[in-house]
Amino acid sequence: MTIQTGRLTDPAVRAFVSAVNAHDREAFMRLLTADATMADDGVDHDLAEWTEREIFSSHGHLEVDNESGGGRVLLARHSNDTWGEMRTKWRFVVEDDGRISRFETGQA
């Protein structure tokens, strides 16, 4: 059963999913710290290149099935024009100012 984005517990994670699904690059970037990092399947990637390829230019979309860790760990179906749909796990590090300093994703 899908969790509606507006019902996600953590405000930063909720805004992250909303920005991804709206393909709103500016809102997405405002959510991140200036030195934010990310990893996919345990490998660090250049955040700007990865998000352009996996989210923005490929029409990425997240359907959240489960959340844990105070809303900072998601099980979600991530789909895009490149890979189709896959079950993924997302982990977020949210700083005191409410911005995301790191996210990690990978197949679940």
Image (tube, rainbow, N blue to C red):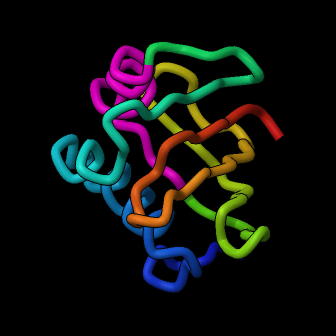
Q: Which residues are magenta?
A: 47-62
Could you tell whether 8 is left or right of 75 in the image? left
On whether residue 54 falls in the magenta region, the answer is yes
Question: Which residue lies most toward the left here?
Answer: 26
Above or below, 65 against 89 in this view is below
Q: Quadrant of residue 32?
A: top left
Task: Point out residue 65 in the picture as x, y percentages from the top left corner.
Answer: 70, 66
Could you tell whether 100 is left or right of 32 in the image? right
Task: Point out residue 14 in the picture as x, y percentages from the top left corner.
Answer: 46, 69
Residue sitting at 72 percent across and 42 percent down? 88
Per the picture, the main secondary structure of the magenta-coloured stretch is: helix
Question: Which residue lies most toward the right here?
Answer: 108
Above or below, 17 against 20 in this view is below
Residue sitting at 45 percent across and 47 percent down? 61
Could you tell whether 98 is left or right of 2 in the image? left
Residue sitting at 64 percent across and 73 percent down? 2
| 78 and 68: which is toward the camera | 68
The quadrant of the image that shows the C terminus is top right
On whether residue 105 falls in the magenta region, the answer is no
